[in-house]
Image (tube, grey):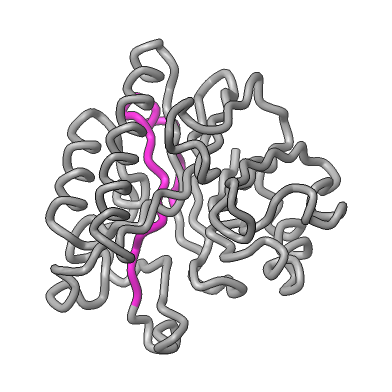
Amino acid sequence: MRVISWNVNGLRAAHKKGFLDWISGENPDIMCLQETKAHEEQLPEEIKSIPGYTSYFSTPEKKGYSGVGLYAKKAPESVQYGFGDRFDSEGRTIIADFGEFVLFNIYFPNGKRSAERLQYKMDFYGAFLEYAEKTKQSGKHVVVCGDVNTAHKEIDLARPKENVKVSGFLPEERAWMDEFLARGYKDTLRIFNQEPENYTYWDQMTRARDRNVGWRIDYFFVDQEFAGRLTSAFVLADVMGSDHCPVGIEIA
């Protein structure tokens, strides 16, 4: 089973840049999108109804902002939009139960705008971890993907020293990722690949992608027990169309 995640930075924009051709060629079993920036009624029919897939969208109250989407060849047993708390109004989360695992597709908040948004991000991290732990304790395997908006270690961004005081690489954000992994989750890419420069996001304003001055902030995590089912984890750095690139895993 091939599962791919991509922050598309606007699904309607991605559609104009050939998203349908790309997904047809890539042929994932499950496709997770973040930052769709559209309410479902704003999406063209060919995006909502891709042949061979069932689609699900979680949208925020505010239009043109946030949002996540999920396409699945085999429809999940159940789908939930959000954690059932104060964070759900921003349309950041789809939780889909596929029987053998529960998939969390999440666009985690960005903390750069203000101290309030950084606190919101940290609170969101806490709410997510609590929900993931409950899911794991219920006997389900957990697969988490999305834009986490934090680079975990120095190897995960091109310029760590210059960014130690920037949200996305703050000590408290990185400490939360340490805690999350210590609870029994694996960063899937690092199971298979210990190399630097596996970035997934590049700032468009500075044309950073041309120089590969990037950040690895898009991830797949799985619970420790499920990690043995993985046959690969990858970054599709050559795929254009967004300021992020897709990431993925293969499950045996």
Q: Is residue 222 above or below residue 113?
A: above
Query: In the picture, residue 94 is in which quadrant?
Result: top right
The furthest residue to the top: 138
* Viewer-proximal residue among 11 and 40: 40
Q: Is residue 184 above or below residue 199?
A: above
Q: Is residue 101 above or below residue 156?
A: above
Q: Position of residue 123 (x, y in %)?
A: 28, 40
Name the residue at 44% across, 86% down.
Answer: 205
Query: In the picture, residue 138 is in which quadrant?
Result: top left
Side of 49 where 222 appears, left or right: left
Whether residue 32 is visible here, answered yes or no, is: no
Q: Position of residue 53 (x, y in %)?
A: 77, 40
Side of 44 where 201 appears, left or right: left
- Magenta region, main secondary structure: strand
* Viewer-proximal residue among 237 and 152: 152
The residue segment tinted magenta is: 214-233
Name the residue at 39% across, 27% down.
Answer: 226
Side of 46 where 92 appears, left or right: left
Q: Verify whether residue 221 appears in magenta.
A: yes
Q: Verify whether residue 146 appears in magenta.
A: no
Name the residue at 33% across, 65% down.
Answer: 113
Split into 4 quadrants, where in the image is the N terminus?
A: top right
Q: Position of residue 170 (x, y in %)?
A: 17, 60
Whether residue 240 is visible here, answered yes or no, is: yes
